[in-house]
Amino acid sequence: MSLRMFLVFCLLVFLNELSLANNIQVKINVNQVRSEKGNIVVLLYSKEAGFPNKVASADSKKIVPAIVGSQIILIDVPGSGDYAISIFHDENSNLEIDTNWIGIPKEGVGVSNNAKGRMGPPKFKDAVAQINAESTIDITLKYL
């Protein structure tokens, strides 16, 4: 390996370690999971685009098997700041929030601050919470 390639490799390792050093883990208490079917999908957003249901728009996501009742999920966050968290019980494991013919979710959904929507999903600004390494977020799932 040439000296130049070695230095580039060292720089990449250093930058990766630096970005990981800023990451924190946040504890999320998910309540009222109705069954063990499928998964719980946790999505973290730093901006409004895609909130609350676009998986590809999330800054961070975590998928874990569903456990009836309550469960604790740890999710990586890029650093302290303002974020909105969206959770859904993906009972059929298709990574989408399934809805009925008028758009009401058939699977359990919830967001940070347990914000509620009016004639649609909750607004990003209502779900935003200040998150740091000591944060614990409680979210209760709502089912149709």
Image: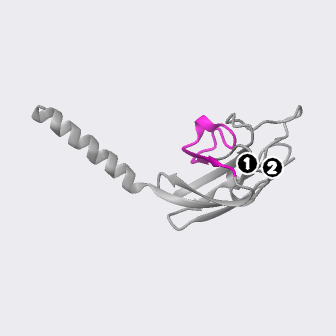
Q: Secondary structure at mark 2?
A: loop
Q: Residue furthest left?
A: 3
Q: Secondary structure at mark 1?
A: loop
Residue 80 visible, this orientation = no
Determine the residue positioned at 80% across, 53% down: 34
**Residue 107 is inside the magenta segment:** no
Determine the residue positioned at 75% across, 56% down: 68
**Residue 61 is inside the magenta segment:** yes
Horizontal relation, residue 79 to residue 38: left or right: left
Query: In the displayed structure, would residue 36 be above or below residue 28?
Result: above
Give, as a three-letter code, the residue at label 1: Lys
* Span of residues in magenta: 42-66
Q: Is there CB contact under 8 Å for labels 1 and 2?
A: yes
Determine which quarter of the picture holds residue 56.
Answer: top right
Quarter occupied by the N terminus: top left
What residue sits right under mark 2 in the picture? 117
Residue 39, position as x, y percentages in the image: 68, 45
Determine the residue positioned at 22% across, 38% down: 9
Residue 116, position as x, y percentages in the image: 79, 53
Front residue of 118 and 18:
18
Front residue of 144 and 127:
144
Determine which quarter of the picture holds residue 58.
Answer: top right
Query: In the displayed structure, would residue 114 be above or below residue 99?
Result: below
Horizontal relation, residue 1 to residue 112: left or right: left
Q: Residue furthest bottom?
A: 134
Residue 67, position as x, y percentages in the image: 70, 54
The numbered dot on residue 123 is: 1
Residue 46, position as x, y percentages in the image: 57, 48
Query: In the displayed structure, would residue 105 be above or below residue 28?
Result: above
Answer with mark 1 or mark 2, whichever residue precedes in sequence.
Answer: 2
Give, as a three-letter code, the residue at label 2: Gly
Residue 77 visible, this orientation = yes
